[in-house]
Amino acid sequence: MYRRPILAANWKMNKGPSETQDFVKSFIQKSSERFSADIVIAAPFLCLPALSESLREVDGVEMAAQNCSQFDDGAYTGEISVKMLRQVLVRHVIIGHSERRSIFGETNAVINAKMKKAREVGLKLIFCIGETLEERNAGQLEAVLSSQIIEGLAGLTLEDLDHTVIAYEPVWAIGTGVTATAEQAQEAHAYVRSVVASIYGEEAAQKMRIQYGGSVKPNNAAELMACPDIDGALIGGASLDAQSFFDIIKNGVPA
Ligand code: PGA
């Protein structure tokens, strides 16, 4: 089945509003044609209005937030609600990134609550999962991924799944320069798809796009993206530079 590739930049806590405008200016100078892929930029909350403004004239690039609150508007100091994200025209939200899990203590239950809240307002989900090196070495890869998927997606409908992309990001490959080999990534992606099939059926699993994330660079994008179950990439460090993000797209999704 054809699955349209989806490549997303995850800037993490980098760039302010003015750097955001510079990035978009430089990125659009490179891309005169539309890509045959969905392109998403996940910027810090504070940059989203500037990103929205800069992307007004740009076709085919959508905005994501990197997180959202699991609560509706109210007394939650320091949080950002899904309703606020919609107001600034955000279309996607990354949920369950390993940094949110490990640094900010987000559990599968919290991640599940955020996913449901985001779907209430029609946000599309980029749902991150992935194992640590200790878990992989202890033979727990499949157990970890399946519980992240089952608990993270609990209560989400088939329609919600239609608006969900899973990002498989082995924690040991994030920001380390160590990429999973194409073979390791493909194996994990096929497993992820099989878990989705066991919950939602084969057809839904075949439609589901699964991104790989973890040290994706211009020089490894093509090999990773050529794997049958890899449908895109979530790119951290190498997405901060417009040229490098552009090269990843160009190499990963040949025209
Ligand atoms: P990286 O980050 O590309 O810098 O490894 C990926 C991610 O954390 O989404």
Image (cartoon, rainbow, N blue to C red):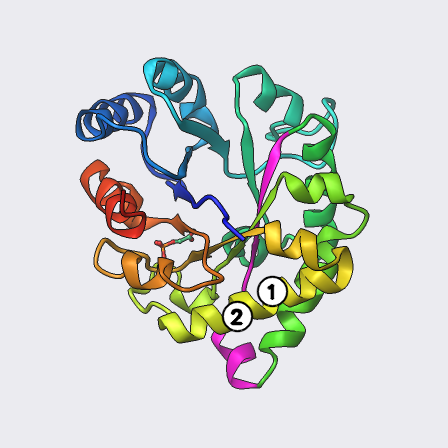
> Left or right: where does residue 129 sit relative to residue 151?
left
- From what the image shows, is residue 248 above or below residue 130? above
Which residue is depicted at the point 33% across and 27% down? 16
> Left or right: where does residue 3 sit relative to residue 8?
right
> Left or right: where does residue 44 sit relative to residue 29?
right
Residue 130 percent coordinates (x, y):
54, 64
User: Is residue 43 visible to the viewer in this orientation of the structure?
Assistant: yes
- From what the image shows, is residue 47 above or below residue 113? above
User: Is residue 107 visible to the viewer in this orientation of the structure?
Assistant: no
Q: Which residue is mark 2?
A: 188
Q: Is mark 2 within 8 Å of ligand 1?
A: no
Residue density around tag 1, few if under 14, some if 14–19, many if 20 or more, within 10 Å: many
Circle 1: residue type: Val
Q: Is mark 1 within 8 Å of ligand 1?
A: no
Residue 54 percent coordinates (x, y):
33, 17
Separation (CA) of disc 1 from disc 2: 6 Å
